Amino acid sequence: MKLQQKLAVQIPEMRQRVNKLLSESGDIVVGDVTIKQVYGGMRGVKCMVTDISYVDPNEGIRLRGHTISELLKLLPKPEGAEVPLVGGLYYLLLTGEVPTMAEAMEVEDELKARSEVPQHVFKILGFMAEKASPMNLFSTAIMLLETDSVFAARYDEGMQKEEYWEPMLEDSLNLVAKLPTIAAYIYRLKHMNGSIPKPDLNLDWGANFAHMMGIEDPDYKDLSRLYFIVHSDHESGNASAHATHMVASTLSDIYYAASAGMNGLAGPLHGRANQENLHWLLGVYDKYGRVPSKDELRQYAWDTLNAGQVIPGYGHAVLRKTDPRYTALHEFGKKHFPDDPIFKLADLLYEVVPDVLREQGKARNPWPNVDAISGTLQHHYGIQDCDSNGLCGFYTVLFGVSRVLGVSANAVWARALGQPIERPKSLTTAMLEEIVDKVQVA
Ligand code: NMX
Ligand code: MLT
């Protein structure tokens, strides 16, 4: 069934479920909040809801109930390909159902029909390219598309609240459709004077990105789809998803909201960790002129920690085991280029870093996250993260292209369920001290 029709059937049922929960059980307690959590980035505080994905600390992400490895088997694939269609994943994120090939292709066709990027975006990015980082360009490009927001226009006309999700979906499809061209254009501006091949209408959304990057190796098409699938969603508390949700909760449209999410993704503790990890690996490789020994790598890792820095790509706010997204990308590298020296180095890092972090005793999770391998795979295909002016972050743009799938699917459902403006409560330090005094007296 077509995406829009399917959602039109699902939304009233879901509204009923949520209304029942709220009216019959709205006052039931879900969890307590400690002072450590109030000061500690709200870690573990249960205060958001999404049905699109869930991160179990040990098992990792499930998207609509499916693990990454299940999804790679379940979702429809283009003929002869190893990795499924991203259009099929988007259908799953939005509807919760594994699409048939026809349903996945309907989404792919919708995206193709909406993929033309307005000329002003190319022009303005072109003016900025010399001085702006790839993530600045990416976030700006999303904002430049805002002029065409259907949601903003319909809101001004005075639409009913029940209808909000429809233009939100329209905008989301329009935005997602253009992202591969925008990302490839940013790369080409930085490295190839901004000339970009026309999208190939015979290719799917993910493969078209590879084509526009000028890489015709079919393996890179598979890697692009894989990359865009694994980074798409990671429940709603992560910084990019949460920022998007918060901004959208003010009834800003998806362009304002997703651009805010991308600004969060640009930080080194979040999506930029893929860039940091790759640069770290290249730094080690350059220092020794080869893959170092385990002892040398251990020392390098300690030097990083002793300099007060983090080891990028390791640790996580929720996960407590190896990230299954790391595993999926690692398997791809192992199958296609096990002898790539940087891939070997990333492998050696896995053998060294968890022990080092355990020995240091600070990180709650010593295992790798997705960013400990993703840059290595792009690097293998010759994709550079930095331009000749030293402006870096293209790998984070690729994370961002994928993350917009998840945050926009969430934004459509947030509108459908009438989620209100987000507004948690802040306290003062004196108030917390007062709470402590009262507890101690009692
Ligand atoms: N290297 C060194 N120290 C670390 C690391 C690491 N990889 N991970 C955590 N720590 C430290 C952390 O800085 C903190 O130190 P302090 O008490 O001095 O402030 C301490 O260990 C406790 O932190 P955790 O509670 O384990 O982690 P938290 O939930 O606060 O932060 C991350 C999670 C992901 C921000 C953190 O593990 C980190 O900085 N990792 C490296 C950057 C990274 O890979 N980010 C990408 C995350 C995934 N993504 O795609 O967004
Ligand atoms: C993500 O994919 O957003 C990261 O792993 C960070 C997180 O989940 O906190």
Image: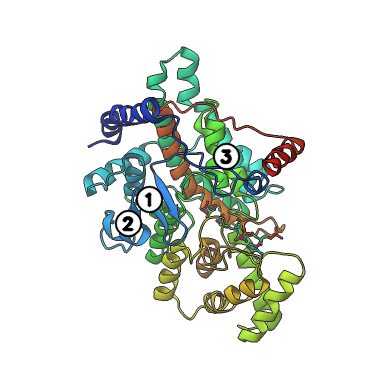
| Direction from residue 134 to residue 197 in the image, left or right | left
Considering depth in this image, is 17 or 147 the residue closer to the camera? 17
As helix, strand or loop, the secondary structure at mark 3 comes to helix
Name the residue tied to disc 2. 71
As helix, strand or loop, the secondary structure at mark 2 comes to helix
Q: Quadrant of residue 333?
A: bottom left
The location of residue 227, given as percent across then percent down, is: 45, 58
| Direction from residue 220 to residue 436 in the image, left or right | right
Please state which amino acid type lies under the numbered disc 1: Leu
**As displayed, is residue 329 above or below residue 140?**
below
Disc assigned to residue 109: none
Considering depth in this image, is 174 or 428 the residue closer to the camera? 428
Q: Residue at x 41, y 15 (%)?
A: 160
Disc assigned to residue 63: 1
In the image, which is nearer the foreground, mark 1 or mark 2? 1
Disc assigned to residue 243: 3
- Disc 2 from disc 3: Cα separation: 27 Å
Q: Residue at x 41, y 39 (%)?
A: 409
Please state which amino acid type lies under the numbered disc 3: Ala
